[in-house]
Image (spheres, grey):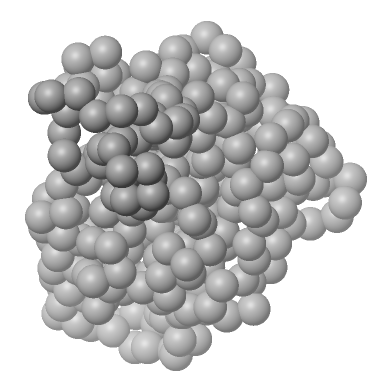
């Protein structure tokens, strides 16, 4: 994509997502996320009935009196957007690739963060960490993130969700929101997922395409290419059914992991409007949290 084309797309995305954030999304974002974290403020002397878990043992030992830690509600959040850029994201059956849906979603999340004066960062991953932009504030920073999303060319094709999650656990020192955008075509990432769910307010954003689950009537034998391995495959209808079944099993494992980890997730059909499920999700989450 030429630089002029990228800038044009950035302006289009800014206009479209900015309008949505102003009119509908920002309020939901505010009610769901604002004040979810806490930060240390000071210590005060222990009063009967205080939670003993809040005792500051170092200060208590030094002074000879019992002190507890006081905390303030944290007014600023860090929002991390992790985006899968493996080759399977460059698939789409109705004119909209999963990767395009991911860019639009990431843009909405980023603009929502700066609307509420929060920091936002970006991690792009395949089977390696392709790019990491630390969380910062400001519109210029968000526009840089969108430019990277539009122009970035991944060096690798496969997927390693565990590596992406473990990298973020190591890099991000404070609690925050982690929006993890992927089709979750991977395995053996359960441990790192559960660790990330304990550290962050982790929201998986699962992107799918209907053709992954139901192929139309096709000739007896068709030629296909595996986007991640590059292998050329001659497939029969029976083989396609096996591929679809395997995809369903991978999806079922991911959904089961989300449930076991106690996280809410957003399910996106890349062939449809990608933003309606986001708005629905945050409205449901607001009701769930009673805010």
Task: Pick the residue in front: 123 or 56.
Answer: 56
> For the view shown, which residue lies furthest in the top direction?
23
Quarter of the image with the N terminus in it: bottom right
Task: Please state the horizontal and vertical placement of residue 13, each as a whole percent of the image.
Answer: 67, 32
Q: Is residue 265 above or below residue 214?
A: above
Task: Please state the horizontal and vertical placement of residue 225, each as a whole percent of the image.
Answer: 44, 81
Task: Pick the residue in front: 125 or 91.
Answer: 125
Q: Is residue 232 above or below residue 12?
A: below
Name the residue located 88 percent from the left edge and 51 percent from the top edge: 3
Apparent side of residue 113 relative to residue 137 in the rendered image (left or right): left
- Residue 37 visible (yes or no): yes
Name the residue located 19 percent from the left edge and 82 percent from the top edge: 239
- Residue 244 visible (yes or no): no
Name the residue located 82 percent from the left edge and 46 percent from the top edge: 5
Apparent side of residue 237 relative to residue 61 in the rendered image (left or right): left
Quarter of the image with the C terminus in it: top left
Q: Quadrant of residue 243?
A: bottom left
Q: Quadrant of residue 234?
A: bottom left
Task: Please state the horizontal and vertical placement of residue 287, each as a whole percent of the image.
Answer: 20, 16
Task: Please state the horizontal and vertical placement of residue 184, each as a whole percent of the image.
Answer: 32, 63
Apparent side of residue 277 relative to residue 153 in the rendered image (left or right): left
Q: Is residue 285 above or below residue 120?
A: above
Name the residue located 16 percent from the left edge and 54 percent from the top edge: 261
Task: Pick the residue in front: 262 or 231.
Answer: 262
Q: Quadrant of residue 226?
A: bottom left
């Amino acid at each position: 994509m030429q630089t002029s084309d990228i800038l044009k797309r950035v302006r289009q995305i800014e206009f479209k997502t900015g309008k949505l954030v102003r009119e509908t999304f920002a309020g939901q974002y505010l009610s769901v996320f604002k004040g979810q974290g806490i930060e240390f403020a000071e210590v005060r002397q222990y009063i009967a009935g205080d939670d003993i878990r809040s005792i500051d043992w170092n200060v208590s030992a030094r002074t000879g009196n019992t002190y507890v830690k006081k905390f303030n509600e944290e007014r600023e959040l860090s929002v991390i957007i992790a985006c899968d850029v493996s080759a399977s994201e460059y698939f789409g059956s109705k004119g909209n690739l999963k990767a395009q849906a991911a860019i639009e979603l990431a843009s909405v999340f980023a603009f929502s963060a700066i609307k509420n004066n929060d920091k936002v960062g970006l991690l792009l991953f395949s089977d390696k960490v392709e790019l990491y932009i630390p969380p910062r504030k400001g519109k210029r920073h968000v526009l840089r993130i969108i430019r990277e999303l539009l122009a970035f060319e991944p060096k690798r094709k496969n997927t390693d969700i565990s590596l992406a999650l473990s990298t973020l656990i190591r890099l991000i020192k404070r609690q925050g929101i982690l929006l993890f955008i992927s089709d979750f075509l991977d395995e053996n990432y359960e441990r790192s997922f559960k660790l990330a769910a304990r550290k962050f307010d982790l929201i998986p954003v699962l992107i799918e395409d209907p053709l992954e689950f139901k192929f139309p009537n096709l000739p007896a034998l068709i030629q296909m290419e595996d986007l991640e391995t590059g292998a050329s495959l001659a497939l029969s209808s029976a083989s396609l059914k096996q591929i679809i079944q395997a995809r369903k099993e991978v999806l079922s494992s991911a959904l089961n992991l989300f449930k076991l980890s106690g996280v809410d997730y957003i399910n996106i059909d890349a062939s449809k409007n990608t933003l309606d499920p986001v708005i629905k999700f945050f409205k449901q989450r607001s009701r769930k949290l009673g805010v």
